[in-house]
Amino acid sequence: MLEERNESQADSTIGRAKLGYINDRAEFDGRLVNTISLDQERAPLIRFAFEQYATDRYSVWQLAGLLSDMGLTSRGPRDRPTRPVSTSAVAKILRDPYYTGMLPYKGELYAGRHPALVTQETFEVCQAILDRRNRRGDRDFIHFHYLKGLLYCGLCRTEGRTRRLVYSQSQGNGGVYEYWVCSGKTRDGCRLPSLRMEEIEMAVAAEVVREGLTPGDIAVMRVQLQETADEMQAQDQRVKEALRSELRKLEGQEERLIELAADGAVSTPKLREKLNDITLKKRVIAEKLTHTIERLTAGAERAAAQLDLLERPGPLYRNAEGNVRRDLISGLFERFVVTVDEDGSPALSSQRTVVNGAVHELNRRNHARNTPAKTKKASRDSAEGSLTSSLQANSLSEGWNIHDMVGVTGFEPAASSSRTTRATKLRHTPWPTL
């Protein structure tokens, strides 16, 4: 039974290698055998695709365009020219567990002999994003604008619907005019008027500027960040020991299953299912054991980068190109809800990202601790901001906790901002300044 699981058919790639790999010949035990090796030209781009999609900043369509610009092409026959990889092909790649080092065989997954291009953890993040977008109908449109996907209709929201604003272009006597229109205008009869592009852009610019923090506030948080990073690195050994303990338990379960299989006490389908589950869990733990320190370091670096961004967000945004502005906005906000004032001008309310909201919440707590009238509350906030409470009480909807996301004590996600920016106030100030 277990011999079936270890047969060459179950852990070897049959046929042509997938994109990112090549069919190769290598010497084993003094003889040449067929094997799979990394395609040195395409493998880094496939890995890049998974890593970028896991950031949740790109659609599959945008990612396919980016990969095309970077030179990723299909691997066609020698007598045919290679072509850019299509959007549908990129979608299939993101869904394929082969790139984690696993190999599907007769409906089951086995550890393949080929090298993995992406970690199991990154692959699972991509699957969650793909599933969520399929449920929500997050499609790409013909035109691209750096605010696309971030603007939501406030009128539809008050009526219990979730509708985005769609970027639209129209031809006129004076040239091309750009607008944002609610996607529910035709379907649901939404009354939100078409909003001019420049007014929305200026309102967003004002929101970006208002996120800035004072140099003094940032200096205090940098000290807190370093202290917490040091504390968490000291905790790393305890985390690793817990992971090793869990790994030993899984190995014990695996041994017991093998014994039951030898006695014929477990049916073959059920045995394979349980062994597959244990194999995947062991892979995840092995990756965490390898990357625990890297994750803590990356979390601290992410928080430090957020502080850099909040030091002078206005000038950064003003001088950036469209794609870079998209990245800046995505580092600050999850979305903007758009309504209109009585005079018909757009007004935005913003929802911060988890990390940005955590930074502002920590800043608020720091100010509360330094306010004499709130001494008692500051003491309670200090307790809530401890390392233990941050790790135990701050699980996020995606299943990550604050330790994974930021690595900073007291960085709890803030509630959606209720601030409103009136675009009409900015008509004579093209770019707000700090």
Image (cartoon, rainbow, N blue to C red):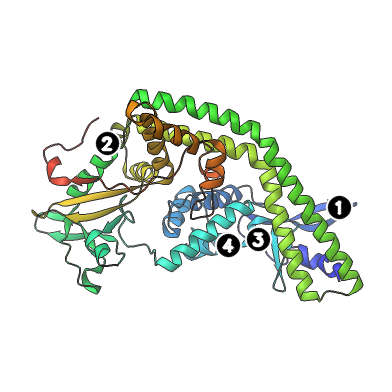
- Three-letter amino acid code at the position of disc 2: Val
The residue beneath circle 3 is: 98
- Three-letter amino acid code at the position of disc 3: Tyr
**Badge 2 or badge 3: first in the primary sequence:** 3
Expressed as whole percent of the image width and height from the top left, the position of residue 254 reads 81, 60
**Badge 3 or badge 4: first in the primary sequence:** 4
- Tell me the crowding category of disc 2: few under 14, some 14 to 19, or many 20 or more residues within 10 angstroms, Cα based: many
If the image is split into quadrants, where does the N terminus sit?
Answer: bottom right
Q: Is 129 on the left-hand or right-hand side of 76?
A: left
In the depicted structure, whether residue 216 falls above or below residue 344: above
Q: Is the C-beta separation of discs 3 and 4 under 8 Å?
A: no
Circle 1: element type: strand
Q: Residue at x 79, y 51 (%)?
A: 248
Label 4, label 2: how many angstroms apart (C-alpha)? 49 Å
**Badge 2 or badge 1: first in the primary sequence:** 1
The residue beneath circle 4 is: 76
Mark whose residue sits in front, 2 or 1: 2
The residue beneath circle 2 is: 209
- Three-letter amino acid code at the position of disc 1: Phe
Circle 2: element type: helix
**Badge 4 or badge 2: first in the primary sequence:** 4
Residue 102 shows in the view: yes
Mark whose residue sits in front, 1 or 3: 3
Circle 3: element type: helix
Expressed as whole percent of the image width and height from the top left, the position of residue 46 reads 57, 52
Q: Is the C-beta separation of discs 4 and 2 under 8 Å?
A: no
